[in-house]
Image (cartoon, helix red, strand yellow):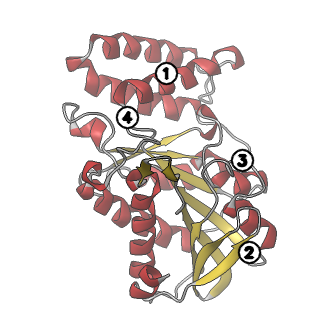
Amino acid sequence: MQAFRDAGLDPYEQPVPGCGGANVLAKIRGDVERYVLVGAHFDHLGTVGRHVFRGADDNAAAVAILIEVGRALEAERTGRGVIIAAFDGEEPPNFLTGAMGSRAFVQANRDPIDFMVCMDLVGHRFGPAAVPDEVGGSIFALGSERSRGTYDLVRSLKRAEAGLVVRPADAEIVPPLSDYEAFWEQRIPFLFLSAGRSRVYHTPEDTPDKLDHKKLQATARWLTRFTRASRMRDTVFVDDSLDRGTLDEVGELLEALAPISPEAAFARSHVLELVASCDRAGYLPANRRSELGSLVGMLEARLA
């Protein structure tokens, strides 16, 4: 609460009965009585036995970005309002149950939400120090295909901040992994920002010294830009996929990795084969879509 106040926000708590906690929310009014929500969960695993799980990447880094976005926007009144939301109850045993703070928010909310941005696992470099910055500076943006104009907006801002590459990818390449799921279920346009699971995910080694602070700062600036643009545009939820766009991003990553990894060079040839199998609209045949998810999973596992 105090961090919100220090950023010039006026926070309040929303009870989450299922987990016995509360969401921390703050509204920034606009000149339109509709809202863009920017959210991240603030809970983590805590103490388990003799081990302390600090959750620097999961998800303190995202909450820090959330507060910085609120600080940058708190005096701006043009367009839609903004709801800054720190959600409780995202981690086990609440994950994917009615005890999640994001689900409690959706059920209780009466403010019209036109767009939702969710952050989770955004604080680390994507891959070890040896990978090129083209790879290490990457954050994936899932869900831009689910609303009109969002993919084009993300693409236009892909390299808007030095040290950061925001890569749009299809929301269905992974199972729903965070607080955006409750909004997706209600057909509210969303964007999920994540660098995937690092090698210290859900371990006591997820500590602040492993965060990439320059990347964090760039992500906060990028998200401020994106939120400003989203306040000014109409969005409509659509059922769509982003096969070709996801393949292009995976191909870029593998091309950057190919000089240092024979495995990446081989996987790059597989990507080119999948691109060739897309139809004119950029969609993969239904029987090959699982291959795209497998490629993304391989990348995450190898670069953890």
Q: Nearer the viewer, mark 3 or mark 1?
A: 3
Disc 2 versus disc 3: nearer the observer: 3
Identify the residue under disc 2: 112
Query: CA separation, marks 3 and 1?
Result: 25 Å
Name which residue lies at 30% across and 55% down. Answer: 208
The three-letter code of the residue at mark 3 reads Leu
**Residue at image coords 63%, 72%:** 23
Q: Quadrant of the C terminus?
A: top left
Across and down, in percent, residue 115 comes to: 63, 64
Point out the tag, 2 or 3, that comes first from the N-terminus.
3
Q: How far across and how far down the image is residue 83, in percent?
A: 59, 76
State the image coordinates of residue 67 (x, y, percent, origin top left): 43, 74
In this rendering, does residue 7 appear at all?
yes
The kind of residue tagged 2 is Pro
Q: Return the mark for residue 295.
A: 1
Mark 2: secondary structure: loop
**As displayed, is residue 26 above or below residue 261?**
below
Residue at which label 4 appears: 199
In this rendering, would 199 be left or right of 277?
left
Which residue does the image show at 31% across and 34% down from the upper left?
127
Kindly identify the amino acid type of the residue bearing the numbered disc 4.
Arg
Question: Label 4, label 1: how many angstroms apart (C-alpha)?
Answer: 18 Å
Q: Nearer the viewer, residue 203 or 184?
A: 203
* Label 1 secondary element: helix
Location of mark 3 (residue) = 96
Q: CA distance from mark 1 to mark 2?
A: 37 Å
Secondary structure type for disc 3: loop
Q: Is residue 170 above or below residue 193?
A: above
